[in-house]
Image: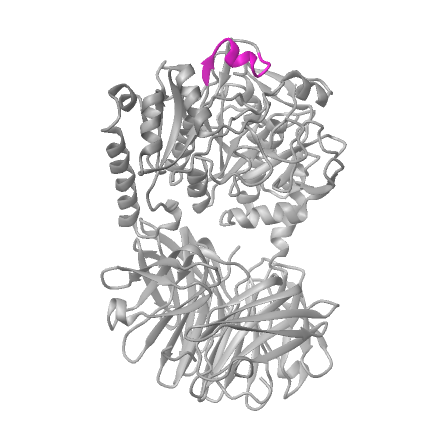
Amino acid sequence: MDSRVKQLTQPWYIHILLYLLVISSYSLFVLGNSHLFAAEITPPPTINITTQQLLDKSKSNNSLHVIATLNIDYKPEGKIKDPQQVMKQRGTIHSQQQNLLKDLPEKTSTSAKLFTYTPQVALTVDEQTLKTLIEDPSIISIQEDIPVPPLLADSTPLINADNVWTSGYTGSGQTVAILDTGVDYAHEFLSEKMVSEACYSSGTSLCPNGLSVDETAGSGVNCDLGTYGCDHGTHVAGIAVGNGDTFSGVAKDADLIAIQIFSQFTGSNCTNYGISSPCALTYTSDQILGLERVYELRSTYNIASVNMSIGGSIYGDYCDTDARKSIIDTLRSVEIATVIASGNDGSSTGISSPACISTAISVGSTTKLDSISSFSNSSAQLDLLAPGSSIYSASAESTYTYKSGTSMATPHVAGAWALLKSKFPSASVSTILSALVNSGVSIYDSRNSLTFPRIDLDNALTSINDLAKTWYLAEGYTGEDFSTYILIQNPNASVAHITVNYLVENGSNVTKTYTISAQKRFTINAVNDIGKDLGFSTKIVSDQPLIVERAMYWGTGGHDSIGTTTPALTWYLTEGFTGSDYETYILLQNPNNTVAHCNVQYFLENGPNTQKTHTIPANKRYTVNAVNEIGAGYGFSTKITCDVPVVTERAMYWGDDGHVSIGTPELATTWYLAEGYTGQDFTTYLLIQNPQTNSTTITVNYLVENGDNVSKEYTVDAQKRFTINAINDIGGGKGFATSITSDENIAVERAMYWPGGGHDSVGSTYKSTQWYLAEGYTGEDFSTYILFQNPNPTPVNITVEFMVENGANITKTYSVDANKRFTISAQNEIGSGLGFSTKIDSSQPIVVERAMYWGTGGHCSKGWSL
């Protein structure tokens, strides 16, 4: 802070896409020769079919299976926080489907497949009906619904799954959904694993009841083995979740959902793929029905992932116009990963659909010698690699066999998801993907000179654990009457040994070491380590996972922020104000051994945007005073881009108070804020940063603690900051939490002010079943409140463990109503005079913050979770 005074924010066509699904992902019985699989099945070439070709095809075939996407304002349901809006969207989808069908021939409308959660309808059409669809403004895209085929010596040690089992994590409590040719769940390798099953088979049905839909007991069993390919799903399921005496699948104690999505075809439908007749092929529409079924089961089972060892034509870029993207996005919005084979065409310039959908997890194949399988498709869009050559697993009728293909690689990754979520049940799809990518074994593909990560589960487990072993805090000051405290929560059953590195802005760096007792809070007064009158950043390294915050106090004011575990190249800071007596400082921490060159871009709420460049010395803290960059009188947001990873915070001061917040390195379309109050003299501002080049529409859902929930909609201009005064939306006297959804990726903070004080926090982009808060105090005139936001449609049960710094730990339990905010006062639970940290466990994912007040001051911080 140097010569800084203190801080706040004052009022401040139709496009028709058709692609042919033609993957050779069908796995053959191969012993030790990965080349046989790719050579045995010869796929048709990739074809770009125009509108006229589509019409010609309907004319020559007399009928054509298509999927039409409706022109409605659609969002994945996990991004819609108001249950009424979810039901409204479903109603809109249904009514639009019915409006379409009423004008179509009866034979088309009666055979239509209607999807519940995505704005699409699958139809069988003739040439005239197809022309009608093409001319219909209520349809934005049409694609052909083409049937395609399904794309262990023990391979689990290669990816170190056995080491993770030894650590006690085996997939228990998690479920993997297999969308394939059904599963022989009577097989000894898969016995007692089935928890749910279904069948969707639109052609010549392979469902046990002979109908196109079967969701009864027994419906997920493997299809008739007289049909080529019907043992494929059993082999795939065995790799993902099989459990045997001498070897096992990846998540050996995970449960299984079997969804059979194939129909029987004969003649050239099979031989065109180089396989014998009759054969099993799957329609895209049946795949969507299967994925919708998984979504319906999300609240019944802890579903970690969906496995789809199928594919289609090759794309050299993302294929986000694919009809399956909507439901894949919907699954990802509730943290279910859709894991898909990259295909077996041997391409080095593209991967198959639907693996090319950007929100899917695409998987290629490696050999046991850790080289790229010759048949495996590869391009820059590929996410992960896993063993796929000569994999031994269950086969139908209680046998075992070898198969090769990206079909075999994919369930290694689907099982990996369940394995890792058995340790980290609240981890997001992005967190697990990042861990698998960053900890994987690098495999070079000589065909395109690209390198990809082959999964290593032991390293991935360590990677997620290590996220909480290194912490960064960009702000810190011991000058004037400022006191800076580093607050460390050790939730482990063993002591933690930590090293604290102070990166001093204008002085020598300092290093100190400490030991922290098990399941306790520990406080460091920075002035005792580095002396007075120093601005600094901090890096904390521990041998155990920890949670770290930093609190600063001066006069009657103070502020606090959670730290971050990961430096980044790009950061966003939503709040900022240079008006009146407000001062805004941007704190940049460079923990690297090289200088950092950073560009600071200011998005002014009512003024011209501007940008400045700065150079931050290696292993130092650097301060930018915003008024020197943009002038006085502006509310603004900031985007910081650097050439090496750094950490950023923003501190604001005014009068004798101020607030601070860590930046966010990621944008999102959904944000949560657990704190908010419009009572007494409190004013709450929601601060929205839109760094995109186009405007965005946001929906603000207020979850009122003792009142009716409220929803409002706003438009935020491109590359601008936007401020909402909550009292104008919900009125005075309300405690509330907020969820904000947007059409575009944005950043969100919340600032609160009252006479003489204020606090601020960046929002959370995720919900979790486990949260940690390192700071808390009930001494003197301090009051600490823990704020819970339950955005779920059902009540949740929470357990709160107070880890007292110098006393016995205390545990309490509560229930939080559906779609509500809930507040507890720590004094009422543990008494006065105690410093503490908090651990919260919840029966469903929630959002947590902690607010502290004293005199005229106060501060707030979001909690931390994986």
Q: Residue at x 39, y 32 (%)?
A: 293
Q: Residue at x 27, y 24 (%)?
A: 109
Q: Please indicate whether residue 736 sits to the left or right of residue 174 in the image.
A: left
**Membership of 792 in magenta stretch:** no
Q: Please indicate whether residue 819 sits to the left or right of residue 516 in the image.
A: left
**Membership of 265 in magenta stretch:** yes
Magenta region: which residues?
Answer: 263-275
Q: Of residues 692 and 425, which is closer to you in this image?
A: 692
Q: Quadrant of the N terminus?
A: bottom right
Residue 792 vs 515, above or below: the answer is above
Residue 714 vs 614, above or below: the answer is above
Q: Of residues 739 and 636, which is closer to you in this image?
A: 636
Q: Position of residue 823 (x, y in %)?
A: 34, 65
Task: Work out whether residue 485 can be spotted.
Answer: yes
Q: Residue furthest front?
A: 52
Q: Position of residue 7 (x, y in %)?
A: 47, 83
Q: Residue at x 66, y 16 (%)?
A: 40
Task: Work out whether residue 114 can be spotted.
Answer: no
Quadrant housing residue 214: top left
Q: Of residues 304 and 72, which is closer to you in this image?
A: 72
Q: Position of residue 592 (x, y in %)?
A: 71, 67
Total marks in image: 0
Q: Of residues 324 and 436, which is closer to you in this image?
A: 324
Q: Residue at x 55, y 30 (%)?
A: 241
Quadrant housing residue 3: bottom right
